[in-house]
Image: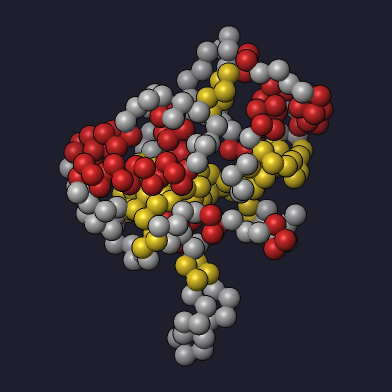
Amino acid sequence: MVEPGDDLAELIIVALAASEQSLQDGDVLVLAQKIVSKAEGRYAYLNDIEPSVQARELAEQCDKDPRHMQVLLNESREVIRQRPGVVIVEHVLGYVHANAGIDRSNISSDDDNPRLLLLPESPDRSAAQLRDVLQMRLGVAVNIVINDSAGRAWRNGTLGFAIGTAGFEALENRVGEKDLYGRPLEITEVAVADELAAAASFVMGQGDEALPLVLIRGAKLRPSANGSGALIRDREKDMFR
């Protein structure tokens, strides 16, 4: 039950002790986006929102609250698709996401002034800062993934994916490496961060499990100071737009 201003690093240290775990160099900590957003106070209160004409039109098309749609538009570069119940957008951070990642599940709210939880302003920055603080306090170099849930254009169901990373190469280019028969790989890139995020998401669950932090050990990762930006496909290469 994270609140704005909470020290995530301290909460992690306490949780590790309660689980009789200790961090090692190279470990991966996967955090649910919600606890990062909560700690950063990323709330929007619907009573404070004045919907625009575009938000009202979108709300009518999608059977949504116009104020909610205004928050969505504020968090988006472009509305890509819409139908009753869902809006697919390009988020201001670059990734294509349903409802701009805005959520009301697993957050407390006042019925007289409902609130929405937005994504962190810069998940990569949040991940890097948390990694630095943990290294300073514990003396270990860990890798950080901030994950969220998303659907896919070509399959049913949601799965975890990385919206922020720190410490490792989120997308590994394996072009030129050999397969089992010595043939060079020609186009293979591995979304390592998404693979880790999905595995952790399965452990976290999607309902009332209350498990927003997962420790992964043994992943062979390539160190990198870059964040998760390489995972976002260029628009001109996106066959689903």
Quadrant of the rendering where the C terminus is positioned: bottom right
Of the pair 203 and 40, the residue shown nearer to us: 40
How far from the left and from the top, in percent, is residue 92? 63, 41
Classify the position of the N terminus by image quarter. Answer: top left
Count numbered badges in the picture: 0
Q: Residue at x 70, y 26 (%)?
A: 70
Visible residue check, residue 208: no
Q: Is residue 67 visible?
A: yes
User: Is residue 68 or residue 42 the one in the foreground?
Assistant: 42
In the rendered view, would you say 10 is above or below 29? above
**48 or 34: nearer the viewer:** 48
Residue 166, percent from left and from top: 40, 52
The residue that appears at 66% across and 31% down in the rendered structure is 74
Question: Whole-percent x and y of residue 85?
Answer: 71, 33
Give left or right: position of 113 versus 193: right
Q: Is residue 201 above or below residue 212?
A: below
Q: Residue at x 20, y 36 (%)?
A: 18
Tell me, what colour scheme is on the image?
A: secondary structure
On the image, the x and y values in percent for residue 75 come to: 63, 35
Is residue 24 positioned above or below 126 on the image? Answer: below
- In the displayed structure image, the side of residue 237 where residue 164 appears, left or right: left
Q: Residue pushed farthest top?
A: 112
Q: Tell me if residue 72 comes above or below residue 20 in the rendering.
A: above
Residue placed farthest to the bottom in the image? 182
